[in-house]
Image (cartoon, helix red, strand yellow):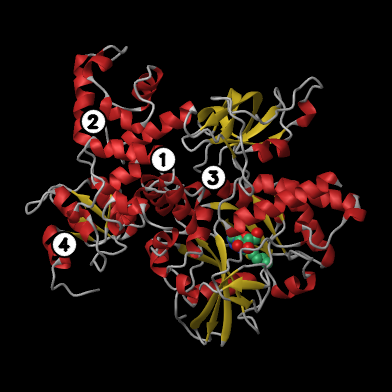
């Protein structure tokens, strides 16, 4: 009973992370294993059955901001399998219900977020997310920005009411670009393209959605009566109507042919521009589909075969606990080195205490390690059959491994934190490294190792101490000669010129990333105004929500922080608006992400950069799916050029740019 309850609550929690937050922390495989275990236990112990068990429901993706509508045809999910023998069992089950041979349609299983689009007389009426399968969120405005989804269908004999079902995906190249941008802006990267796609579809600003270049692949059309008698012919017809049907679809007349299709795509899918996680096998005849019908959750006429992410088995040597700049404690597994997808894995992420509990991890265990997409390797399971009695259970630490303070875990948060903000060494060092970092004060020569050295020698214990460093103190340290000491001091001196917004970002206030810092600098002319700002002053700014506002207020309520800011000011740091860099609103480049490339004749790059900022645009360093255009001079980089072509991003020269931002320029 205990295990059933634990599994239920864990699955509900992961449903929320997956469907609502678009930020899952476990792989599909791990999720499926939990669900299988739950289903098996509920079957074995029917006395503990519950109507609201997640095993009986489709996870819900409802967000409050969108209007909901009922689906004309419910949106069910698919039963899935990872094994060939279960696939053969599916074939046997299908054949038991009908006489003779069955024809299947095989399709790729696109790894994105499902969408249902209703076309009324060929015109898009409404686009709904899956929601809970019965009702979905109306995301029409967002869907209309996706170029591969037609607003009007084309061709003849289009049913008066047609529902198109498909998967919205984020192409891998777009995903990579967006994550580079997010990291550069101190935003957490998306775990994989599916979450990026689903997070994007739920954005409240369709313009943002448009900038993210989503794509859509359709896998079914529904109408009454259907446009043909078979699923395959329906898809062919859908393609005539202008819906994007992937050319991999194939009719198979035996389960062996299906299996051949599966093994062909196991490798070949890696060459596709988007992610897929398996193959969907569907009974082709619609009449047969109807005869087979549905179980409570899934159609009996279709099954998903999922490819397993590459995994390896190795020994768990120990678990260490890392404390980050913000005090968050992350458990990390130290593993016996093992080869996995071309690299040697020695460490794996364990996320948090719940994850360790759920896996019931013990030192010495043989563990399954998986490397999925961009994410660092993680432990997804334990081979408990290989476990000896003497193995010690891994207990989450209660004291900070760095400073001995009792850890806290706030309600609703997954991580443990060390609350010793002032004295915990990795937190202090982390803040100093953040301060000197390239995106902040950009102090050359004060990287991780040197900060460690200065801290260990008690020369810096606070960001303001950097400005008190003296030549004779530095040359006394190992590895620092006269020349590097002079260079360090020189770059500290130069850093005083850092613009206000970057200096604000450098303070390392929780939740104040680069973009938020820029917004704050543009709204509050000096740090004193920001120090005095109240909760409402802050939250009245579009980008500043209650969480950010509370964090800013807490930061400036701390007298030691006020003291630090005042020491930084005395050192000469600008904590007030450089009018040239302050954006006053109403600019011509609002919400535009612009990459500058090459050399220019009329103005320097920095001048162009500040013109972009003055007009409300953002200067980004790398070309990605979210780039609005490239301001190109002579000798534009080849890789930027080819990326621009790939994403279809306009390239404009300086004359066009100056015309664009000139006073008389016509608004778009
Ligand atoms: S058919 C009733 N075909 O996978 C059957 N689904 O686990 C409906 N998906 O919600 C689904 N590619 O979002 C189907 N070729 C494909 C698919 C596909 C991706 C997604 C879809 C669905 C989920 C089912």
Q: Nearer the viewer, mark 1 or mark 2?
A: 1
**Which residue in the protein does label 4 denote?**
657
Residue at which label 2 appears: 492
Left or right placement of residue 430 versus residue 231 in this view: left
Do labels 1 and 2 touch, CB within 8 Å?
Answer: no
Sequence-first tag of 1 and 3 = 3
Circle nearer the viewer, 4 or 3: 4
> Is residue 624 visible to us here?
yes
Q: Residues under labels 1 and 2: Cα distance?
A: 25 Å
Secondary structure of residue under mark 4: helix
| Mark 3 lies on residue | 267
Disc 3 to disc 2, C-alpha distance: 52 Å
Looking at the rendered image, the quarter that the C terminus falls into is: bottom left
Mark 3 residue crowding within 10 angstroms, few (<14) / some (14–19) / many (20+): few
Specify which label sits upstream in the sequence, 1 or 4.
1
Which residue is label 1 attached to? 559
**Going 29% across and 45% down the picture, which residue do you hit?**
502
Task: Kindly identify the residue that appears in the image at 75 percent across and 23 percent down.
Answer: 392
Residue shown at 44% from the left, 42% from the top: 558
Label 4 residue near ligand 1, CB within 8 Å: no
* Distance between mark 1 and mark 4 Cα atoms: 46 Å
Rounded to the nearest angstrom, the CA distance separating label 1 from label 3 is: 59 Å
């Amino acid at each position: 009973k205990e295990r059933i309850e634990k599994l239920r609550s864990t699955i509900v929690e992961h449903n929320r992370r997956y469907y609502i937050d678009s930020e899952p922390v476990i792989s599909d495989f791990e999720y499926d294993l939990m669900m299988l275990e739950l289903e098996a236990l509920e079957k074995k112990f029917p006395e503990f059955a519950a109507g609201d068990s997640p095993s009986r429901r489709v996870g819900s993706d409802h967000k409050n901001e969108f209007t909901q509508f009922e689906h004309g045809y419910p949106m069910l999910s698919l039963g899935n399998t990872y094994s060939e023998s279960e696939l053969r069992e599916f074939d046997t089950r299908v054949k038991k219900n009908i006489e003779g041979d069955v024809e299947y349609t095989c399709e790729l299983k696109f790894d994105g977020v499902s969408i249902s689009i209703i076309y009324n007389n060929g015109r898009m009426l409404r686009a709904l997310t899956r929601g809970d399968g019965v009702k979905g969120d109306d995301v029409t405005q967002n869907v209309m920005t996706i170029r591969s989804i037609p607003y009007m269908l084309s061709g003849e004999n289009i049913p008066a009411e047609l529902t198109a079902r498909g998967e919205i995906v984020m192409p891998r190249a777009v995903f990579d670009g967006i994550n580079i941008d997010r990291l550069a802006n101190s935003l957490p990267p998306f775990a994989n393209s599916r979450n990026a796609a689903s997070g994007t579809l739920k954005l409240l600003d369709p313009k943002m959605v448009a900038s993210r270049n989503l794509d859509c692949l359709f896998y079914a059309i529904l109408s009454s009566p259907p446009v043909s008698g078979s699923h395959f012919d329906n898809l062919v017809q859908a393609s005539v109507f202008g819906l994007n049907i992937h050319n991999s679809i194939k009719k198979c007349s035996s389960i062996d042919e299906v299996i051949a299709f599966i093994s062909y795509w196991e490798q070949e899918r890696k060459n596709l521009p988007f992610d897929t996680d398996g193959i969907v096998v569907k009974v082709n005849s619609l009449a047969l589909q109807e005869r087979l019908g549905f179980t409570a959750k899934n159609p009996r006429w279709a099954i998903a075969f999922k490819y397993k992410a590459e995994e390896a088995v190795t020994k768990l040597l120990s678990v260490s606990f890392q404390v980050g700049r913000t005090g968050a404690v992350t458990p990390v597994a130290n593993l016996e080195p093992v080869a996995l997808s071309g690299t040697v894995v020695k460490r794996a992420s364990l996320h948090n205490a719940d994850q360790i509990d759920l896996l019931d991890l013990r030192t010495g265990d043989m563990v399954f390690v998986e490397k999925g997409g961009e994410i660092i390797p993680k432990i997804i399971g334990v081979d408990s059959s290989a476990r000896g009695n003497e193995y010690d259970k891994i207990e989450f630490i209660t004291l900070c491994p760095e400073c001995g303070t009792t850890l806290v875990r706030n309600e609703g948060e997954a991580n443990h934190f060390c609350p010793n903000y002032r004295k915990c060494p990795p937190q202090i060092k982390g803040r100093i490294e953040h301060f000197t970092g390239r995106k902040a004060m950009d102090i050359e020569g004060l990287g991780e190792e040197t900060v460690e050295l200065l801290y260990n020698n008690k020369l810096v214990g606070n960001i303001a101490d950097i400005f008190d460093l003296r030549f004779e103190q530095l040359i006394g340290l190992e590895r620092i000669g006269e020349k590097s000491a002079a260079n360090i001091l020189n770059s500290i001196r130069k850093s005083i010129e850092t613009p206000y917004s970057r200096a604000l970002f450098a303070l390392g206030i929780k939740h104040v990333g680069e973009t938020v810092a820029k917004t704050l600098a543009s709204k509050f002319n000096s740090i004193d105004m920001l120090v005095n700002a109240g909760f409402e002053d802050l939250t009245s700014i579009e980008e500043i929500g209650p969480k950010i506002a509370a964090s800013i207020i807490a930061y400036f309520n701390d007298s030691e922080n006020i003291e630090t800011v005042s020491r930084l000011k005395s050192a000469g740091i600008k904590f007030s608006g450089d009018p040239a860099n302050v954006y006053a609103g109403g600019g011509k480049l609002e919400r535009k992400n612009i990459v500058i490339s090459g050399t220019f004749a009329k103005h320097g790059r920095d001048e162009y950069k500040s013109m972009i900022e003055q007009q409300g645009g953002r200067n980004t360093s790398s070309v990605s799916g979210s780039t609005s255009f490239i301001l190109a001079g002579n000798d534009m980089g080849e890789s930027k050029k080819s990326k621009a072509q790939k994403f279809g991003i306009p390239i404009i020269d300086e004359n066009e740019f100056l015309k664009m931002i000139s006073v008389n320029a016509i608004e778009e």
